[in-house]
Amino acid sequence: MANILSTGTSALIAFQRALSTVSHNVANINTPGYSRQRVDFEARSPQFTGAGYVGRGTQIVDVRRVADDLANARLIDSSGELARLEQLASLSGRVDRLMSESTTGIAGVWSNFFDSVSALSSSASAPAERQNMLGQANAMTGRFQQLQGQFDRLSGEVDAGLAASAAEVNRLSSEIAQLNGRIGNAQTAPPDLLDRRERMIRDLVGLTGGSAVQQDGGAMNVFSAGGQALVVGIQASTLTTVADPYRPERRQLALQTQGQTVRIDERVMGGKIGGLLEFRDQVLAPTESELGRVALALGTTFNAGHAAGMDQYGDMGGPFFNLAPPGVNPHSGNAGTATMSAAVADLAAVDGRNVVLQFRSGAWTAADAATGVAVPLTGTGASGDPLRVGGLAVNVSGAAQEGDRFLLQPTAQAARGLSVAITDPGRIAAATPVQVKATLGNLGSARPGSVRVVDAADPALRAPSTVEFLDGDQYMVDGDGPFPYTPGMTISANGWSFVLDGIPSAGDSFSMGPTGSGSSDNGNAALLAGFDDRAALNGGSLTLNGAIQGLTTAVGSAARQAGYAAEAQAALHAQAEAARESISGVNLDEEAANMLRLQQAYQAAAQIISTADTLFQSLLGAVRR
């Protein structure tokens, strides 16, 4: 009877604990990352009675979680990639909306400005058209500045996101290290602690990308996508942000471990942090540079064209736009006294990419700031021989020390510095400063076309001049010559040029003279109206309109690609989650069946104890009689 009671009691206790495990599963059906638990039974050691062995009931040998390491690893990896792509797609979409929407983009105000220049060319002396052109110019430059301001705010958001993510990484790393110490051997660890650690690892990898590797003894080591150790056993590294050595207002990532602060290669980070860095380096920075390149090209070409015209006061045109010079930022670790200043030398060669200039072995070298690839560089930097790189001329003053570095930003902040340089509508140089007239006694059919200014700085540009034909094949300019002539060729001198329509005769002459103040001439305005279609970039193969369209298209394409990639990864992540849930997830139907089965077993065990009690009471009663 004692054996019956012991057997029933062991079963009762075992089934009670099994029922508790089932109820624990049901209670955590909505707990993220929970893995269902299962009770493993085994028979207790039998008792030898002399005639054989008699069983002594059952016992629980393990309460373990149902999990698959491969499914969990796949889900962890998927979490990091999904977080990266979602972050990249979200921020890229914001830049796309800034550039493409009419209320925030540049295309609308750009067209309005050149439409106003075209309107001025039709009525060069109209005050209203001149005022409208200034208003449209201010609206356009204001939009450039607004976009740059939005980009600055996005850059600030990236910095804030890096700081917040670093703090969260440190919290998760510390807790994972503590859990490693508490868990010890994974074979005997509480299942709920294993679930908690796994969930934290998934969250950590979602921030940094990377992987988790189980070491001997059960501890989990976590590494970022770039291979940096975040957690090793019970030791956690500290992620922090430090100032960019070239631009102190911008933050970079660094890892503090073993008493050292090591900068992290941002190109290999994953997770949400990787998405932030990838957006800043591959979407935001190129967009800023290209927008600045458009602003630089607009200001440079339009200023040159405006300088070739004459305003209503009879003066040659001055700068129409103010332009900021290219930026040159020294490295915070420079030891020398060298300073640099840059100016545009060849607009067609300016590509907008940032360049690192470094002083090595007594000479300067240039490398792409994003890739480290060498960039062609000429000049020594000495007085009279500036460094020439990417269409810029860089003047160096002071003494450089070995290893000194400078970051050259040709266009990154050009949009911020673009503004209208004039406030008086009368200062718009709409007129051509030189006019040509055919002498009344000319016998030929030649008629002069519009005068073009070839060199606005020529001191003789506006001096009276005469072009006289000796015959139909040669001419003289103010007694100089003769010069050969063929019909349709350009006649040029003193910084001006024009083309004759028709055939000149011997003795025909044409007089050049300055345009008077207050003129309604629209020659220069007509030229300025077509500057948006002037091929000024990419070696003279890309127009300003083409650059605007290309920028908008490139940003939109990057945003769409990031969005598509995020959608595809979300589908893969859902599959990974489904695979894990199919193994570790709680199924209510299965748990209900287990509960019913265990309840019946529990009741049967209770009946065994009741039977043993009845037998025992019967035996006691027989003895008392």
Image (spheres, helix red, strand yellow):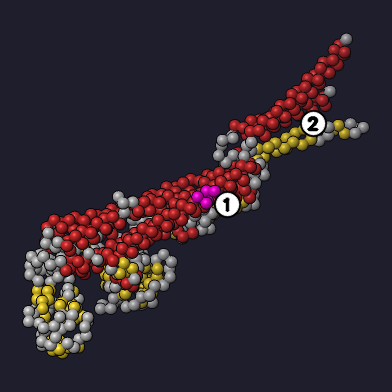
Q: What is the quadrant of the N terminus in the image?
A: top right
Gap between marks 2 and 1, in whole Å? Answer: 42 Å
Q: Position of residue 278 (x, y in %)?
A: 44, 57
Q: Position of residue 127 (x, y in %)?
A: 11, 58
- Identify the image quadrant of residue 37: top right
Q: Residue at x 65, y 43 (%)?
A: 583
Quick one: which residue is furthest to the top in this view? 625
Residue at the disc numbered 1 = 212
Observer able to see residue 462: no
Depth check, front residue: 419 or 498: 498
196 is higher (above) or lower (below) than 491: above
Q: Which mark is residue 57?
A: 2
Q: Which mark is residue 360?
A: none
**Element assignment for label 1:** strand
Neighbourhood count class around disc 1 (C-alpha, 10 Å): few under 14, some 14–19, many 20 upward = many
Magenta residues (range): 567-572
Observer able to see residue 348: yes
Q: Position of residue 168 (x, y in %)?
A: 46, 46
**Element assignment for label 2:** loop
Marks 1 and 2: in contact by CB < 8 Å? no
Neighbourhood count class around disc 2 (C-alpha, 10 Å): few under 14, some 14–19, many 20 upward = many
- Identify the image quadrant of residue 152: bottom left
- Identify the image quadrant of residue 123: bottom left
